[in-house]
Image (tube, rainbow, N blue to C red):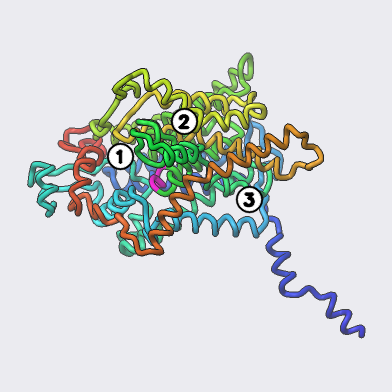
Amino acid sequence: MREENQLALKPTGRTGIVNFLRHEVKLSYRGFYLSSLVFLVLPVIIFCLGYLKLGAGVPLAVIFAGIVFLSVMDCRRNSRGQQLADDSDCIRLQVSCIAGLAVTAIVLSYVTGIGEYIYTLQDHSYRRAILRDLVNYDWPVIYNYNTQTNPEVVKIFGMISGERAFSYYFIYWLPAALVGKTAGFAAADFFLLIWNSAGIFLTMTGLMKLAGRQTRIVPFVYIFFAGLDAIPNMINCIAPFDSWVWLQGWVPYLSYVANFTELANVFNQAVPCFLIMTLLLMSENTRSMGLTGGILFAYSPWAVIGLIPIVAVMLFKGDRSGADFKRSVRNILSSVNIFSAVTILFLFGSFYLANSGSLGYRGFTWTFYDNRLMFIPAYIVFIAIEVLPFVLMLYSREKNNPVFLASVLVLLIIPIYRVTEMNDFSMRCSMPGLFVISVCLMKMLAEEVVRDDRTRTRRNWFAAAAVTLAMILMMFPAFVDLYLIIGSQATGGQSNREDIGSFGNINKAQYAEVIQDQFFVENYKETFFFRYLAK
């Protein structure tokens, strides 16, 4: 009998596993910050060493490495330069949560087509060609017109000889391309899947800290945040719009894009942008924002335009006069901020300017309407669907938050200008502002989940119902994309990921004009970057 009691007191294997999964792990902020900066800056260093002449590339790589070192050493000090209390900035997560975030990141990367293991959305034909050419061509990538074998493409280009350089914000692919050069294209695909998953995992880990608790709300909002595009889509089913373009392009020349759609189409911009915004929102001081914010220029020059006003508010938040203002100015003028801004702008500014003619359509949005006055109702309806619902939900909580207010203001201004046929200006400049809104929403939902029901008034219940309905409608774009991806995969649908193949030998002529306009640099040897910096 005594032996049976002793056996009963021994923990079973299942109990041990449960206890292990519930074990809390403390992730230091410095370790998180270092991991995030390595993820963001390593592709830039690869670009410097692989794309530039040694005389330019090595010093620039050393500068970036030095900036990272200084930033990491300073990251645990507040705006006054005081060391933060021990463990005050740790990220505390259970093992089960860490494992869940890792699995979520990998699954999300997989279903959004990273590595091309599943049916992919349209933009992947360009993304796959970029990775393939970075693997197969020497750096810098230079194309010759005589490699085009499709006669329709040759006719569009109008020439059969001559060289042009590849210019695009492609550094996100460089680590995978480097792996592909040594281990083959399949290895590059797999590494890109892991790399992308690491970026998503880091972002969601930081968002747990911002949310103030371990909660499933974080991956939910990260994946599904979007405007209420379900409403115009339902109306269109009943009374079709003449100007309808696509799911999230129901207003002519205007569109704010859902997180899932960004991750599925322009992951090279979205994943680093979301991580950078998370770092900025977590920052305790402004002495390194030139690096954490400025590095976005290497990944998405459009997103940087939307980021600048938000960072400007962050730099001066809470510092308005006297000694605080002087301290704020000194922090802004830190060596890390100055060297980061100057180096990034010099390097990537000169690279992008080599292809300055790629912008296409440009101008105030109303100038593209047949009746310019129609822009006014279009703008009002667009803002009412994409921005206003979240402002109404969050305003009472965030009305004293200058970062939230700056984000809303930026989102109100962006639609008045258009660049490129699909208006990349609107779709990409809005990413930082929309992400700030999503983080504020995340915090609100995380608090609502743990609120005691007895504290709710009838008005609270109506507000909760409205928020719940908005969350359901918000998921619509992601579910449509998932339906297309998974449904097409299940039924054997033909993906267009190989429609291009390589920019050096384009398979389908329908892509040739866009590629020539947006990715090729004619007379590249006459540009500053390719004359003085590139190999």
Disc with the residue nearer the chain's start (3 vs 1):
1
Residue topped by disc 3 = 216
Q: Nearer the viewer, residue 263 or 469?
A: 469
Which structural element holds mark 1?
Answer: helix
Q: Nearer the viewer, residue 470 or 181?
A: 470
Q: Amino acid at mark 2?
A: Leu
Magenta stretch in the rendered image: 265-269
Residue 360 vs residue 212: left or right?
left
Provide residue 183's location: percent of width, then percent of height.
Answer: 33, 64
Q: How many marks?
A: 3
Residue 162 vs residue 128: left or right?
left
Residue topped by disc 2 = 307
SS majority, magenta: helix
Q: How many angstroms separate mark 3 from mark 2 (CA)?
A: 27 Å
Residue occupying the point 62% across, 14% down: 321
Residue occupying the point 48% across, 24% down: 412
Q: How many angstroms separate mark 1 from mark 2 (CA)?
A: 28 Å
**Quick check: 190 above or below 331?**
below
Provide residue 392's location: percent of width, then percent of height.
Answer: 60, 28
Q: Which mark is residue 56?
A: 1
Tag in front: 3 or 2: 3
